[in-house]
Image (cartoon, rainbow, N blue to C red):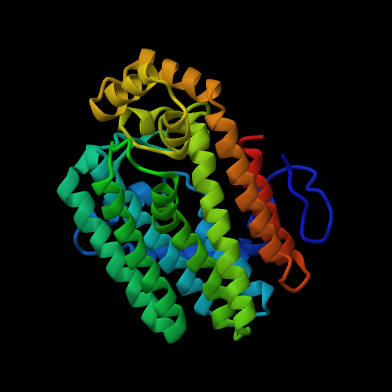
Amino acid sequence: MSLASPVGRASPTASIDPIVAVTRDDMQRVNQLILSMAGSNVELIPEIAEHLIGSGGKRLRPMLTIASALAFGYRGDGHIKLAASVEFLHTATLLHDDVVDESNLRRGRKTARTIWGNQASVLVGDYLLGQAFKMMVEVGSMRALAILSNASAVIAEGEVWQLSAAKSLATTEEDYAAVIGAKTAALFAAAAEVGPVIAGADDAAHVAMRDYGLHLGLAFQLVDDVLDYGGSAGDLGKNVGDDFREGKITLPVILAHGSANESERAFWREALENGRNDDGALERARLLLERHGALEATRERARQHGARALDAVRKLPAGDSRDALAAVVDFCIDRIS
């Protein structure tokens, strides 16, 4: 379902092309900086970093930083370093996530941990975090540094929280919202907010962009939750059904389990808590999610967050950057429409 743009026009096609176009020149500089900062005399560091950096991700988070800075008329170089920092924070998180989740594929390619091992993946992730903070400091904005460093801490906290609740069907919808707010939405929110910060915009602009990024991030995660039970590896950047096979408790499962009968609850316990999650179990899980309307309920929550992201972006100055940021929301929601 396509959402209306902030200037009242329906998006003809859901695509991130508008934000790619708006940020193209600056993103070339970001990409050059990323490759430069991923370099090291320790051969394994650039080898692993370039494996993940070059694996076909959209680089949406750094594009949010660039577009949000341009939306408020920023003229300078600080947004380049902050965008590269955002991408390094994200890349480090992926390296660490794949180790924690024991993932073998990401975006259709072998994960770094399957090629070089868990220890190297964790340590290179740490190196990228260090490089990210180095670039943040060089920008010279204490507020931007505070926003991104806080996001880094929140993301780590969310990872620990998720680990402590892993495979627990006692997880509530409120618990899950808090986890994905920390793990996923926090970096979206920070990436969007630092743009108006370095542009010298007022506090209302900071709040608008933080809200935009927060709700966009929540919508993206809920969309991924739906796609794990019916999307494609290309949509997800990982194997369909990975969340189920890893015993992850996502919102569709929480909703279906909450309205399940005893036989169905026993199935969820066996599949997610006890690891009996072969292809046959995945198919039954899909049927149960449809039967209880859990996938559609998750879609609706994603749409609600998308609408709130659009409400926030309407507060930006009119222009190509604002329209591009709105188009990202349409792209997100269209993946499950």
Residue at 44% over, 32% down:
258
Q: In this view, does 218 lie above or below 234?
A: below
Residue at 41% over, 55% down:
178
Q: Percent x, y for residue 309?
A: 64, 58
Residue 172 seen from this side: yes
Residue at 62% over, 63% down:
23
Q: Is residue 193 above or below residue 325?
A: below
Residue 311 figure quarter: bottom right
Question: Looking at the image, which residue sits at the far top?
Answer: 280
Total numbered circles:
0
Residue 45 figure quarter: bottom left
Residue 26 seen from this side: no
Residue 142 figure quarter: bottom left
Question: Looking at the image, which residue sits at the far left?
Answer: 119
Question: Looking at the image, which residue sits at the far front?
Answer: 262
Q: Is residue 8 above or below residue 36?
A: above
Q: Quadrant of the N terminus?
A: top right
Left or right: 135 with respect to 122? right
Q: Quadrant of the C terminus?
A: top right
Q: Is residue 6 above or below residue 275?
A: below
